[in-house]
Amino acid sequence: MLKIVVWVFCIALGTPLFAQRSKSKTEPVPDRTYWVDILYRLSSPILSNMSKGELKKNMVLELSPTWDNRNKEVAYLEAFGRLMAGVAPWLNLPDDDTPEGIKRKQVREWALQSYRNAVDPESPDYLLWKGTNQILVDAAYLAESFMRAPDALWAPLDPVTKARYVTVFKGLRSIRPAYNNWLVFRGMIEAFLASINEEYDAYALDVAVRKMNEWYLGDGWYSDGPEYSLDYYNGYVIHPMLVEITEVMEQKKISGSLSFDLALRRMQRYNQLIERLISPEATYPAVGRSVTYRMGTFQTLALSAWKYGLPEKMTNGQVRNALTAVMKRMFSVEGNFGKEGFLQLGFVGHQTGLADYYTNNGSLYMTSLVFMPLGLPAEHNFWTAPAEEWTSQKAWSGKPFPKDYHESIKK
């Protein structure tokens, strides 16, 4: 009886209540809108607080159960640096009055003020720049964010803030990198300094590139140091930073033992393999250390889609569909975010036991690295191409799919 009364009342007012409700249920959210919503959800708790100098005050820290007792303030630089490396391409787009554009402008304003606060000794959110080697890692992601959107994020900063970044980055030369992917972090900072025509350490650049080239195993895979380990550090760190370092070296005519072209071709081969690890059900193997970095696993695909183009025979519709499906599978599970909005330890949901001894919830903002294709305009083919099945979907449904084969990529 109540439904009939409401229905009659709505007709009298000319309000198509049930038609509107039905429409909202049947219209799918566009992939780009979904990506923007997740990225904004990741960004806003960090940047809205840090822009006001309140990140240290309000961020709910979560440390690994096996935390090694390093200074817990590393968490704030980890969260900020890693987040910005993924957000940067999106913020490079021009302003517009769309719902997405309004969010983007807000995030950019927060980010620029956060950059200032990070190196201002008078700010409550002045970050930890001395005292622990971990700083080198996340300073590299911060430098990478400037390299990914120099016009939007570096150029607008005032001269005092820029000078402070140059000083803190050069001050990190006293840190002795671990004999593994950490060499690339040192190289990334020097590449950024070279990119802005500052004095740079050519030897550090040479060592980073030379050692990683020596540790190349073949078929798109580098060893993370002298001994190989099966994990996703080729995606989290090695391929993207090597490509970006060698690109700067080529632009600045800095000689090195690995060319930009070769680094890129190796990353594209890795992309072919990492895409095949996405199952028909939109999952991927939870192997190796740092699986709590979540979607950061697919940074190489994101970087190629945004800046360099995808490998031959791999389409935008295929990759967008695959990454969107994995995102939805992951972020639909409760527990990824705490009640205050910050990421929580885990792979899918809240799984504290997966955290390594160096992991805090600031570390987890590595997941933002998958969102780089948002740096492409909405009308780009990556966003407008029809969704296509990814490789394992075709393979496990009996459809034709590209045969895989070993590639020798040494020259």
Image (tube, grey):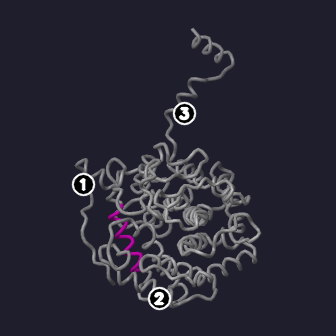
* Residue 116 location (% of width, % of height): 72, 68
- Of labels 1 and 3, earlier in sequence is 3
Q: Is residue 189 left or right of residue 235?
A: right
Q: Which residue is mark 2?
A: 206
Eyeballing the image, is 137 above or below 55?
A: below
- Of labels 1 and 2, earlier in sequence is 2
Q: Quadrant of the N terminus?
A: top right
The magenta span reads 261-274
Q: Which residue is mark 3?
A: 24
* Residue 7 location (% of width, % of height): 60, 15
Eyeballing the image, is 137 above or below 305?
A: below
Q: Residues within 10 Å of mark 3 (few under 14, many from 20)?
A: few
Q: Residues within 10 Å of mark 2 (few under 14, many from 20)?
A: some
Q: Which residue is mark 1?
A: 400
Eyeballing the image, is 329 above or below 120?
A: above
Residue drawn at 50 percent across, 86 percent down: 205
> Is there any visible trace of residue 89 in the rendered image?
no
